[in-house]
Image: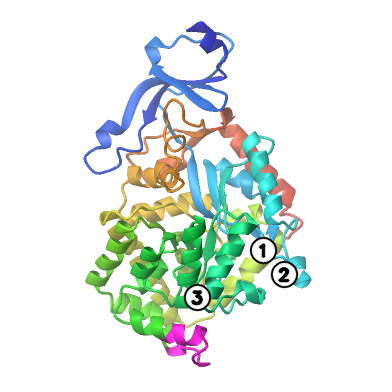
Amino acid sequence: MWPLLLALQLAVVDVSVVHVDHDRAGDEANAVTPHQTVLIADGRVVSIVNANQAELPPHITRIDGSGRFLVPGYTDMHVHLDRNGALVDGTLELLLAHGVTYVRNMSSGEWPDRPAAKRAASTGTPISLEHLRDLQRNLDAGAVLGPRILALGSAPVAGGNPNEAPVWWQPSTYDQGYDLALRLHASGVDFIKCYDGLSRSAFLGLAKGARETKLPLAGHLPWSVDPAEAARAGLRSLEHARLPALACTPHWKHFRAAYDRYVSGETSRWPSDHFRNTVSLAVEDFEPELAASVFRALRDHDVYLCPTLTTRAVDARAHEPDLPRDWRRQYVPARMAAQWDQELRATASVGTRQQMQRQRFFEHAQNLVGQAYDAHVKILVGTDANDTQCFAGFAFHEETQHLAAAGLTPLAVLRAATLTAAEFFELEDAVGKVQPGYQANLVLLGADPRERVEALANIEGVIRNGEWLSREDLEALKNAVALRLDPVTRGR
């Protein structure tokens, strides 16, 4: 035993190991094995033994796990490391400081000929897909501190794109969508991000190209597409709970048809009446049978739901005057904070009635996530980090609380944040469990995650690629970001 132990780097001693695959009701009692010592070397869990039987050499780093709980590192499945084509300063450190050890970047770089004026408005250093690949490699090697990037998506693909995308990025026909999928595959992205404004035919062509090239398709449900049709076409993950919420009314088919006629060029008339009433109709004319059929389609076609409920909560609260004075603004670059303020003002510039509708819509979408979980739709934890008022890292724990409020048990939320994400990437043999042979990206908690979802934020330390970061180290990471961004000179 000693020759193996001499190579060990780290041992978490006398800890309760949490098994996230025991997440369904009635199985929580089997989800924790107490008094274990977890041995780690070369970035992987080597073995897990009873604490009374562990023989450790004197030189090994020992972490006291007594009274604590060891869980897999968290995965944020919807982040934006960049905004307006530039890295957002501090994002990587803030994510890691909150236990996030893996991320999926939802849009990586941009089309090659984006106008220079747009790039000049960016926050931080302009980036490309190649730049993000370099960052990904450096994170994997430990040369940069932060979560590992599991996937880099394309910039959003949508017809009638308002962000000055080139024509070839705005497919309106089946063939154009298909050709764009082939072009994106050749570009080297890990998945295609589809967006609201695609026509039905363009989406189906994009989906066919994605299937043929084995390039995953993830993103928004286009306004012109039925959820079941999107699921059959191969949509891998559906982002944002607002979209299935809209589809669970009898009005959706009329909404889809009107929008498809517009985006396909059959009419120049914008379907304003449909758009104006969608939020209220989604709540007032909700049909449980339609919801059940939507969730059945997602389940049967193995489509994952990434609700990003935090973004809907921001919509519902945009009118609150204290929102721009949130203490976490100290961790946000000044230019991005100014953009957030503009977006909050625009969202808040509606009447009291619409504000109340948004609050009801958020609560409705949250309830639907619970129904989707009960229907055995696979739920992911994603935050839309760096979207308006979605603070990187902090938002992760807001999102877990929203999921718990939706009806998921604390352990089900933890599974969604760990093993379910690993399964999405087909990495469940290496990621998402505390188990020998698995990557040593782990979180040490000071409270039992089976009892309250808030325990997921009670972080005593993070093991990142086999290296220990204490609570003090994590606080130092956050403090360094705040100091670097210098909130005092920004007048905060």
Name the mark on residue 250.
Answer: none
Q: Is residue 84 visible?
A: yes
Q: Residue at x 46, y 46 (%)?
A: 425
Amino acid type, residue under disc 3 in the picture:
Tyr
Where is residue 244, by image quadrant? bottom left
Residue 268 location, x and y as percent? Answer: 53, 92
Mark 2 to mark 3 CA distance (whole Å): 24 Å
Mark 3 to mark 1 CA distance (whole Å): 23 Å
Residue at numbered disc 3? 174
Q: Residue at x 49, y 90 (%)?
A: 266
Q: Viewer-proximal residue, 297 or 456? A: 297
Residue 71 location, x and y as percent? Answer: 43, 34
Residue at numbered disc 2? 114
Name the mark on residue 110.
Answer: 1
What segment carries the magenta color?
258-273
Amino acid type, residue under disc 2 in the picture:
Arg
